[in-house]
Amino acid sequence: MDFADSIKKYVPFNEQEKNDQAIILRCLEVFEDVLTRSNKIAHFTSSAFVVNKSRDKVLVVHHNIYNSWSWTGGHADGETDLLAVAIKELKEETGVEKICLVTPGIFSLDILPVLGHIKRGEYVSPHLHLSAAFLFEADENEPLTVKEDENSGVQWIPLLKLTAYSNEPHMHKVYEKLITKIDRL
């Protein structure tokens, strides 16, 4: 299925996702380059929300730019297979190899604001990430590795304490939504 079709067919969980889905679909109509960072206003990213088998822990990385514990993920950079992007980023950022997709397709659809910041010595202006996130399960005993150019730590934390680890208040609502959706599986 084409990535645009997967977004069109996504069934929103709540009003936030319904509104974000409409805006993301509008961005697909208006912009030709939403799959690349050449679009300085909004572009696609893909994330992995990773839980352990008992679904009481979540795998997080300490993101160097945001100085916060967060899910793994990255820019589509032209790739139309957003699931492949999420898997690639998850493996690169944590070292885990054995993963299982918990639900088919996109698990969360969000528009995430990114504040202006310095990356590799250059200023990146504020912009929006059009985020498709996927839910995975992994073995919490598998060895973890840090991707030092992006993260300064990787660890499993209690799922219900995720917002306490996050320094990004705008992400708290996203994480709380994900936890609620997991509880309903």
Image: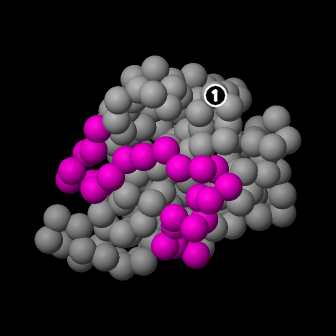
The magenta stretch spans which residues? 145-169
Query: In the image shown, does 110 or 26 lie closer to the viewer?
Result: 110
| Tag 1: amino acid | Lys
Residue at 63% x, 28% y is 53
Residue at 21% x, 50% y is 148
Magenta-colored stretch includes residue 39: no
Magenta-colored stretch includes residue 168: yes
Q: Is residue 170 above or below residue 45?
A: below
Q: Position of residue 77 (x, y in %)?
A: 36, 46
- The residue at which mark 1 appears reads as 53
The C terminus appears in which quarter of the rendering? top right
Residue at 37% x, 58% y is 62
133 with respect to 185 (left or right):
left
Q: Position of residue 68 (x, y in %)?
A: 42, 66
Residue at 20% x, 53% y is 149
Quadrant of residue 9 in the image?
A: top right
Residue closest to the far left: 121
Does any portion of residue 179 appear in the rendered image?
yes
Q: Is residue 97 above or below residue 13?
A: above
Query: In the image shown, does 5 or 50 lie closer to the viewer?
Result: 50
Q: Position of residue 145 (x, y in %)?
A: 29, 38
Secondary structure beneath dot 1 equals loop
Q: Is residue 28 above or below residue 84?
A: below
Query: In the image shown, does 107 or 172 lie closer to the viewer?
Result: 172
